[in-house]
Image: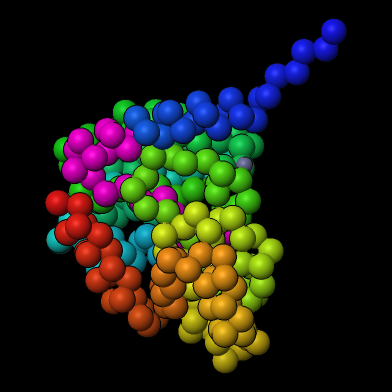
Amino acid sequence: MIKIIRIEESIFQENEKIADQVRNILRGNNILGINVMGAPGSGKTSFIERTIDVLKDEFKFGVIEGDVEGKVDSEKFLKFNISVIQINTGGGCHLDANMVKKAVSEIDLEQIEILFIENVGNLICPAEFDIGTEKNIVISSITEGDDKIEKYPLIFKVSDLCILNKIDLVPYLDFDFGKFENDLKNISSGSKLIKLSSKTGENFNIWIEYLKGLKREKK
Ligand code: MG
Ligand code: ZN
């Protein structure tokens, strides 16, 4: 007799349960948790950095950094004198709720109003694991090409907001904004799109206002 165990389902079920626990912990402490996903090099860290820099006098921030190895991204937040926890997955290509729960247990939650969780750079499986955040953001930069939604629809579908980054590079690239916008509408009509540059700050205020709105909503 062969017994088949459905590993996949049980993994996701277990993850869902822990993600709900994380969400309750964050909500209980009045913390807005934001999962920042995107490919390596899409600009996740610099996006979070600029956001904190703009709003550091208005909100108390915390950052959880998810990487396979190292702490180069975490070190970029030291200048803000905020709580930063580095998760090294040791090869794992996404964060799961259990990792985030452990990281959250290491932070002084009373010192945080907005918690950014930078997921491992990857457009595939981070989309499949709820990590207990209030909102999911996917960052795609125009250097990656305009076909990312078509090729990796799930991550755009599960995200509440898509940031299209590096628009300052538009003169050097053939990026079809119409195609990108249409693809996003087709897979998720409710998903919002903000085109900006974390480097020059172009349109960054639109994101800042959106984030402030989210925080107000939560209170
Ligand atoms: Mg990074
Ligand atoms: Zn993975």
Provide residue 195's location: percent of width, then percent of height.
44, 78
Could you tell me which residue is drawn at 46 percent across and 33 percent down? 16
Q: Describe residue 98's horizontal placement relative to residue 85 as left or right.
A: right
**Snapshot colouring:** rainbow
Question: Does 99 appear above or below 54?
Answer: above
Question: Does 21 appear above or below 202?
Answer: above
- Residue furthest to the right: 1
Could you tell me which residue is drawn at 50 percent across and 36 percent down? 96
Provide residue 110's location: percent of width, then percent of height.
16, 38
Q: Describe residue 81's horizontal placement relative to residue 159 as left or right.
A: left
Q: Range of the magenta residues?
A: 22-46
Quadrant in which residue 107 is drawn: top left
- Residue furthest to the top: 1
Of residues 153 and 82, the one nearer the viewer is: 153
Quadrant in which residue 111 is drawn: top left
In the image, residue 113 lies in the stretch drawn in magenta: no
- Asked if residue 122 shows in the view, the reply is yes
Q: Name the image quarter holding the N terminus.
A: top right
Question: Does 66 appear above or below 57?
Answer: above
